[in-house]
Image: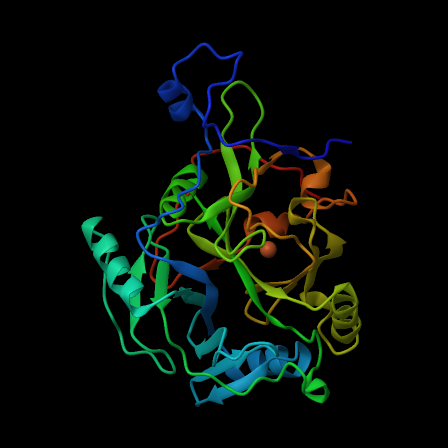
Amino acid sequence: MRLPVSRPFPAARPWYNTRSNSAIATAMPIHAPVFDPPFNVVRASHVELGVRDLSRARAFYVDCLGYLAADETPDALWLRAVEERNHHSIVLRKTSDPNVAALGFKVASETDLDRAAAWFERRSLPVSFPELPFLGRTLRTADPTGMPLEFYFKMEQRPLMLQKYAAHRGGRIQRIDHLNCFTPDVQASYDFYTALGFRLTEYTETDGTDPKLWAVWLHRKGNVHDLAFTNGRGPRLHHIGVWAAGPLDILHLCDVMATSGYLANMERGPGRHGISNAFFLYIRDPDGHRIELFTSDYLTVDPDLEPLRWALDDPQRQTLWGHPAPKSWFEEGSPFAGVPVRDPALAARPVVAR
Ligand SMILES: [Fe+2]
């Protein structure tokens, strides 16, 4: 059994290494966090998913999972979870093919939006401020892989439903927790979001004398992640992680799905992750978009928190109880609308179940 190793950031030269500090910094895949980012991202906030059949998607998200319908039109449905005062954390929009329009992040102020626009503009990345329903001023941009991003400060609010227990159904989902994406270059994605102040909590690396990053978990809000990247054909959305109040809520959703026509939509779990220690269940919506029910990870606010390193072939990395993930979990994801997908440069493969 190989549990993860806590590794300090490479600020100081190790006693056994005779190279210069700058050479070490270049060679190390991970580096120190940025505590004064160019603008202040608060947390992962929302996702817009393209779905082919809105009523079929509504049955899944509202009737089975228990999302609250905040608003709907013939072409779109805005959903929030029971703890969320924000108008929505998932938008379902009718499209001819399943895709993802954008990943949304909340920033700390209107000024942060202007700082963000200037920062992306300086890097020749796209910048626009489209009018979006229920959102205040919203910056639409993209990262260097083409992954579409939205940053906003204000969203319309709705009455708190947290203690309206009679309205909690299905998975009794509390809130959005994180976004997990495939990227063709984990190191490049890690470097980009680290510059924006996202901090590394755990990572997976290949073994050998020249280790490469295979996956990273990055946070802004103080738990294991707001945004994670895994090596693979990308950019694509791997899953939306949503917070459940506890493992029993996740087990209850398993019972609900297994007896209401959604047995085939349960892809992986329930189980306990090695990475993040979270209790999880992965499910697929009727269009194949992946949702993770997620609970009980840990606090990461300490500025000197050292990231945990996992070896790619460690069977307890994926699942603490040793069960490998299915092949579909490593290969299938949701494309971003109009964004080309590239094969990863890194060919290393994890342990996969048959
Ligand atoms: Fe996740």
Q: Is residue 127 left or right of residue 277?
A: left
Question: Nearest the camera: 198 or 142?
Answer: 198
Q: Quadrant of residue 169?
A: bottom right
Q: Quadrant of residue 104?
A: bottom left
The residue sitting at 33% across, 61% down in the picture is 338
Q: Quadrant of residue 164?
A: bottom right
Is residue 106 shown above or below 216? below
- The quadrant of the rendered image in which ligand 1 is seen is bottom right
Q: Quadrant of the N terminus?
A: top right
The residue sitting at 73% across, 57% down in the picture is 269
Kindly tell me whether residue 9 is visible in this rendering.
yes
Residue 165: give x, y in percent of width and height.
71, 85
Residue 265: give x, y in percent of width and height.
67, 67
Judging from the image, the colouring scheme is: rainbow
Circle count: 0
Q: Quadrant of the C terminus?
A: top right
Residue 78: give x, y in percent of width and height.
48, 81
Is residue 19 shown above or below 1? above
Is residue 230 shown above or below 160? above
Kindly tell me whether residue 312 is visible in this rendering.
no
The residue sitting at 42% across, 74% down in the picture is 96
Q: Is residue 199 left or right of residue 295?
A: left
Question: Nearest the camera: 52 or 57?
Answer: 57
Residue 101: give x, y in percent of width and height.
39, 67
